[in-house]
Structure formats: C-alpha cells, structure tokens
Image: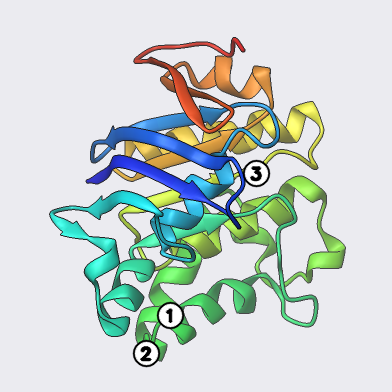
Amino acid sequence: MIYYDKVSKYYNGGRPAVENITLGIEPGEFVSLVGHSGAGKTTLLKLLFAEIHPTEGSVYFGSRDIGDLSTKELLALRRNIGTIFQDFRLLPTKNVYENVAFAMEVAGKGDDDIKADVPHVLELVGLADRMWDFPKQLSGGEQQRVAIARALVNQPDILIADEPTGNLDPINTHDVVQILKKINDLGTTVLLTTHNKMVVDSVGRRVVVMDQGRVVRDDKHGRYTL
C-alpha cells in the first residue's frame, strides 16, 4: 500500500533528513516507527502526505507515485489517511459529538451519515456516554480517544498516530494502545511514531528503527531497542 523507493530529502543543502529509504508497508500492518528526535520519522510522514516532496526517489500509495497526483487526487489520498497527534487538536467550543462530526462535514458527508457514524465510532473508543461533553470536561486520555474517533470516522485506509501517548499517563497510554490494536485488528493499517518503549513492546508487532535519516533495523515482531 505504501512504498518509499530510494527516498532522500535534503533541506537547504544540509545533511539529509532521510537518506536512501526503501520501505514498504502492507495493507493491514501495524508498524511502530521509532528513533531519537531528528531521526527522520516526521519527515517520512510529511512525505506520505505530500506536505513535502522527495529530493530523490519516489513515494507510492498503492500503484500511484504521490508526486504525480493532481491537487484533486491528492485531496482524495489525504481523505484515506486519518491522523492522531500528541496534542489532541480538539475544538474547545464544540462538544465530543460535534468535534467528530466536524471531520465528516469537512469531507462533505450528509446529516444522515453523520447521525449514523458518529455514535458508532464513539462506541468503538468507549465514549458513547460522553458525546455531549466538551473537551475541558474530559481527561487527557478521553480527549485523545475523541481525537482517535475523529481520525476514524471517515473510515480511512491508514491511521497515522504521531506520538499519540506523549502527553498521557501510563494508564491512559495503555488504553490508547489497546484501541489502536483493536482498530488494526478490524483491518486498518496503523503507522505509529513513538519514543515510548512500553508502547512499542505492548504492541508487539513490526518495528522500524531510524537513526540519522536511515532505517537501521526492521523487525517483523520487534521490541523497542535503539
């Protein structure tokens, strides 16, 4: 589904942020992408979104080179990717239901679809009983679960979780990891970036380790070791 073909990215003529990366991610995989700050993890994600473009090589989504997509095709691609961030990014003036529904409204979904899908996805993340609460009434873990629901509600093929547990305590971290595993078990490809050893070890699936812009290890059933 995702393939980085000999990809390098240089910024302003400096050392490469990523260098000669060849990496494939199959549909339905759960991949933990780990490495110290500056290892190149964020650059790989930006290349997938076409927020930036490779200096060398190509990034493929399915059989298509992302660099060859038109603006319309690129927007369609991005609708197939759900994203979760460390800082939640919820709208404080909207309640839980409205935060999730907003993602569907932006995607052009109708009221009937919204009324059917939002409660379903909130049930999946264990927040069906909090849908009328506002972000300030929720714990950090609950806010992150809202963010997960928002990322899932348009049924993306890929879920990118960029340091999703960075602001959470161990109990909420465990809960979020279990939700991500459940989502993956339902068939969604999950790409997780993290510094958290406990998270990677508890997932127990493929681990890709980056260092100084290169992939230095790729283990099908790995643990967190740098």
- Indicate left or right for 88 with 43 as reference: right
Q: Which residue is mark 1?
A: 114
In the rendered image, residue 122, in percent from the top left (x then y), is placed at 54, 59
SS under mark 1: helix
Label 2 – label 3 distance at C-alpha = 29 Å
Q: Where is 198 relative to 166, above or below? A: above
SS under mark 2: loop
Q: Amino acid at mark 2?
A: Gly
Bin the neighbour count of mark 1 within 10 Å (Cα to Cα): few under 14, some 14-19, many 20 and up. Answer: many
In the rendered image, residue 137, in percent from the top left (x then y), is placed at 85, 63
- Check whether the beta carbons of the residues at disc 1 and disc 2 lie within 8 A of each other: yes
In the image, 70 versus 123, the foreground residue is: 70
Residue placed at 61% from the left, 33% from the top? 39
Q: Could you say which disc has been placed on residue 164 in the image? A: 3
Q: How many marks?
A: 3
In the rendered image, residue 90, in percent from the top left (x then y), is placed at 71, 69
Q: Amino acid at mark 1?
A: Ile
Label 3 – label 1 distance at C-alpha = 25 Å
Name of the residue lying farthest toward the left: 63
Residue 51 visible in the shown view = yes
Q: Amino acid at mark 3?
A: Pro
Bin the neighbour count of mark 2 within 10 Å (Cα to Cα): few under 14, some 14-19, many 20 and up. Answer: few
Q: Could you say which disc has been placed on residue 110 in the image? A: 2
Residue placed at 80% from the left, 42% from the top? 167
